Image (cartoon, rainbow, N blue to C red):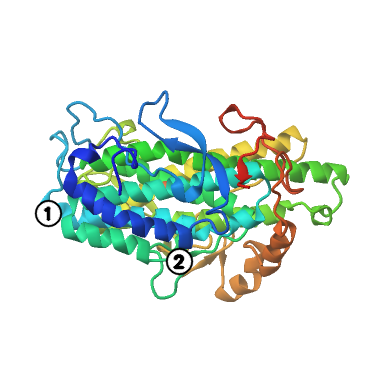
């Protein structure tokens, strides 16, 4: 039995019996999915020090406690309503926002919510083996924190489907548990969510770059005219920030450790002989996960994107920072492939909304990479990490049938095949990473040799705190 107490919520669940029954029906399937496809080996005998969302009050929205993962209290929270909120962009600008789904936009909204919803359980599936190779209890806790919150984000989308889309919504909610990351017959919807995440460099890059695509998408959905969607995604952004913190600081700690090892070896020794992760390998994983995450923003020219914007379903990140919110006359200067290289072409701005969001995303990633590069400066080293050109290794969009190196120089298909592992993780790189991660570190306060400890612990606990404990 689910009670309003068992599902923390601020949506008045106990007074909406129909919705409560629908979620009661879905919840056991969710728990079964979590056990089958969630963190492997950490379901029954481990207690994890995690935060649980208990309200949307900015000063105290979460509390920390030890829980067994299947007993996590996945809740449903919408950010507080904004008084007299008006549609902020597109053709209906200035009208009151919608509390119900308008019939004519039902299919488009359902598609947006399902696509977002599908990414949440997908990432949990992708990361389900990582606990067995963790570099510390601190990192293990962070992994599980991200996992339970992605589970909660699934709940958030399922809440919308059940509340506003009737029968279709209930079917979609079941499908969200039926598709599986990497499954050949019923894969997850988006490619990056079918890639394996088998080592912790993948994981940190994923939370840095792919969770940041989540931030792009959530920012644009939080502008939506459908007010419940806006309020749900606004609160999800609060949790998302921690996921990107995990990714950014995870890589920062690896870079820090690599710099230390290089220093110990007089900057000459191959850092792998010391058990560290060399900078070229780190760069290859940036190249991979950045390019995969660029693809998640969709085609450069998209009539769907134009119609999402025009209909007020999906805005731009931080819509209020733009001057023109109708964007009916404006043009976007887009680089397109041409017979003799790249050509700049003006296209109607609304059809370029995916590219506009991608621009925001690239800027946000760039700032993160600059923060990593400060570590080299501190060590007095001239090495730098960088984002590859956005034409590099694309699987979606105008450049997907062409080949480029990370600086954006065109390559023939033959040269790409011959040289791609200079820029992307090679099987031997992956083997090496698995070899240094084969033995997990489960002792409080200890860290694997390839990563530096964090500067501080979680929720003001010390770094050596027992973030995950085994039940006797
Ligand atoms: Fe999420
Ligand atoms: Fe996330």
Describe residue 185's horizontal placement relative to residue 277 as left or right: left
Residue found at the very far right of the displayed protein:
266
Locate residue 288, reporting x and y percent: 56, 58
Q: Which residue is mark 1?
A: 104
Foreground residue among 325 and 72? 72
Residue 320 quadrant: top left
Locate residue 124, reporting x and y percent: 48, 55
Using a 10 Å C-alpha cutoff, classify the residue at mark 2 as few (fewer than 14 neighbours), some (14 to 19) or many (20 or more).
some
358 relative to 227, above or below? below
- Per the image, label 1 sits on a secondary structure element best described as helix
Task: Report if the beta carbon of the residue with label 2 is closer than 8 angstroms to ligand 2.
Answer: no
Residue 400 has which mark?
A: 2
Using a 10 Å C-alpha cutoff, classify the residue at mark 1 as few (fewer than 14 neighbours), some (14 to 19) or many (20 or more).
few
Foreground residue among 63 and 279? 63
**Looking at the image, which residue is at 18% across and 54% down?**
165
Residue 140 has which mark?
A: none
Locate residue 13, reporting x and y percent: 24, 40
């Amino acid at each position: 039995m689910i009670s309003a107490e068992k599902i923390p919520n601020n949506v008045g669940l106990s007074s909406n019996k129909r919705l409560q029954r629908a979620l009661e029906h879905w919840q056991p399937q969710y728990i079964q999915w979590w056990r089958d496809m969630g963190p492997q080996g950490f379901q029954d005998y481990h207690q994890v020090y995690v935060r649980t969302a208990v309200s949307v009050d900015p000063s105290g929205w979460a509390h920390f406690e030890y829980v067994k993962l299947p007993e996590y209290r996945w809740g449903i929270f919408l950010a507080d309503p904004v008084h007299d909120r008006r549609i902020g962009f597109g053709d209906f600008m200035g009208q009151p926002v919608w509390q119900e789904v308008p019939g004519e936009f039902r299919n488009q909204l359902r598609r947006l919510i399902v696509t977002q919803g599908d990414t949440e359980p997908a990432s949990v599936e992708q990361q389900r083996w990582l606990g067995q190779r963790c570099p510390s209890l601190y990192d293990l806790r962070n992994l599980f924190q991200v996992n339970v919150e992605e589970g909660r984000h699934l709940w958030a989308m399922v809440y919308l489907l059940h509340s506003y889309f009737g029968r279709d919504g209930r079917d979609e909610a079941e499908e969200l548990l039926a598709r599986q990351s990497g499954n050949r017959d019923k894969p997850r919807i988006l490619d990056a969510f079918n890639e394996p995440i088998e080592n912790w460099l993948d994981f940190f890059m994923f939370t840095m770059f792919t969770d940041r695509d989540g931030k792009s998408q959530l920012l644009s959905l939080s502008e939506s005219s459908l007010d419940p969607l806006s309020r749900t995604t606004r609160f999800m952004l609060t949790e998302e920030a921690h996921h990107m913190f995990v990714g950014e600081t995870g890589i920062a700690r690896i870079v820090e450790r690599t710099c230390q090892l290089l220093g110990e070896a007089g900057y000459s020794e191959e850092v792998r002989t010391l058990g560290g992760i060399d900078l070229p390998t780190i760069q290859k994983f940036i190249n991979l996960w950045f390019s995969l995450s660029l693809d998640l923003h969709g085609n450069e020219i998209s009539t769907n994107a134009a119609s999402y914007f025009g209909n007020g379903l999906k805005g731009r990140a931080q819509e209020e920072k733009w001057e023109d919110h109708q964007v009916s006359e404006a043009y976007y200067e887009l680089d397109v492939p041409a017979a003799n290289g790249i050509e700049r072409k003006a296209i109607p701005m609304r059809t370029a909304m995916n590219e506009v969001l991608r621009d925001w995303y690239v800027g946000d990633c760039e700032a993160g990479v600059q923060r990593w590069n400060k570590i080299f400066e501190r060590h007095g080293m001239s090495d730098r990490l960088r984002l590859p050109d956005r034409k590099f290794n694309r699987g979606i969009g105008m450049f997907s049938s062409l080949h480029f190196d990370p600086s954006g120089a065109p390559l023939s298909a033959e040269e790409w095949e011959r040289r791609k592992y200079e820029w992307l993780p090679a099987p031997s790189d992956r083997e090496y990473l698995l070899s240094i991660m084969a033995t997990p570190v489960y002792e409080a306060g200890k860290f694997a040799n390839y990563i530096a400890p964090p500067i501080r612990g979680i929720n003001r606990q010390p770094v050596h705190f027992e973030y995950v404990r085994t039940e006797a």
